[in-house]
Image (cartoon, rainbow, N blue to C red):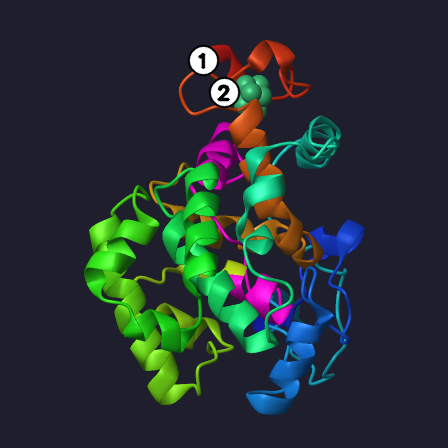
Amino acid sequence: MKAVDLRMVTRRPRCVQGAGPRGDKEEATPLRKGEAAAEGSQSHRPMKRQRKAQRLCVAYEAADGNGEEGKEADPLQAQCWEPQDWRQQLANIRTMRSRRDAPVDQLGAEHCYDPSAPPKVQRYQVLVSLMLSSQTKDQVTAGAMQRLRVWGLTVDSILRTDDSMLGTLIHPVGFWRSKVKFIKQTSAILQQRYGGDIPSSVAELVALPGVGPKMAHLAMATAWGTVSGIAVDTHVHRIANRLRWTKKQTKAPEQTRAALEEWLPRELWGEINTLLVGFGQQICLPLHPRCQNCLNQVLCPAARGL
Ligand code: SF4
């Protein structure tokens, strides 16, 4: 019997064929503020950034051991998992969200900064609004941002504001006392290390006090125009698990982010947060989802059990 060797090969997953990566020219345009991105390329860091390395599927193929490098047997089909019916489920969610009338659509972080401010101030305001938004309804975050903007929402202004006044301005956002501390600490770091701007990488952003991965990915998208990963909050986490968009049930948003990024085509990463957050605010509610009004009712594994 002829000896068979095993060779490890790495290939791009074939499961992304229907909606593959965007190609090498990753767009670097902020959601609304091309100006903000442009300044970043001059004053802080180039806006054109390297795309995240393509994830590679690892497979093993048989070689006949005759030394003919590259001679392959049958083409390999990479074993890439993807959820059943996800394309139709996503299309249905897009249809349900077509009016774009959820709170996140009018009051999300990308709507809370002053578009007439200098670009780096805009980016700072985006970051502050994201810091305020955790555990807080969009309406409450937007109110706090409005008061801060009237007060003066720049790094220097916030550093001159005493904690008591800052607390008064942001109350009643969730965990406002902790957020006062985090915003002051982060503002001091931004002034000392980044010239009053915000850093332009996820690693640097999550190193700031009070900034988590979800905020970092949203800041990268909104402030710098770069899709660095899927921003997973409680809505995205809940809905991804209900629709079985994760291979296994996940317990935390960061697990969900990793599970989604395993299979969801990269060009959809930037869309998924706002799409699912609004869906979670209006239909797929945390406690009593409106399954009767959901186009995914017959496709949703969770609908039957709710
Ligand atoms: S059927 Fe119900 S649980 Fe499933 S996605 Fe729709 S609203 Fe959510």
Which amino acid lies under the numbered mark 1 shown in the image of this protein? Leu
The stretch in magenta equals 219-247
Res. 16 in view? yes
- Circle 2 crowding by C-alpha within 10 Å: few under 14, some 14–19, many from 20: some
Question: Residue 231 location, x and y as percent?
Answer: 51, 53
Query: Does the residue at mark 1 contact the one at mark 2 (Cβ under 8 Å)?
Result: yes
Question: Residue 223 location, x and y as percent?
Answer: 58, 67
* Mark 2 beta carbon near ligand 1 (under 8 Å): yes
**Relative to 173, does residue 212 appear above or below in the rendering?**
below
Closer to the camera in the image, 21 or 103: 103
Res. 301 in view? no
| Displayed quadrant of residue 16 | bottom right
Q: Is residue 79 left or right of residue 71?
A: left
If the image is split into quadrants, where does the N terminus sit?
bottom right
Q: Is residue 261 left or right of residue 298?
A: left
**Number of the label disc, if any, that sits on residue 105:** none
**Relative to 283, does residue 265 appear above or below in the rendering?**
below
Split into quadrants, the picture shows ligand 1 in the one at top right
The CA distance from mark 1 to mark 2 is 6 Å
Which amino acid lies under the numbered mark 2 shown in the image of this protein? Ala
Closer to the camera in the image, 89 or 289: 289
What is the secondary structure assignment of the residue under circle 1? Answer: loop
Residue sitting at 32 percent across and 80 percent down? 189
- Circle 1 crowding by C-alpha within 10 Å: few under 14, some 14–19, many from 20: few
* Mark 1 beta carbon near ligand 1 (under 8 Å): yes
**Relative to 91, does residue 152 appear above or below in the rendering?**
below
Magenta stretch contains residue 246 = yes
Residue sitting at 22 percent across and 66 percent down? 162
Q: Which residue is mark 2?
A: 302
Q: Which residue is mark 1?
A: 306
What is the secondary structure assignment of the residue under circle 2? Answer: loop
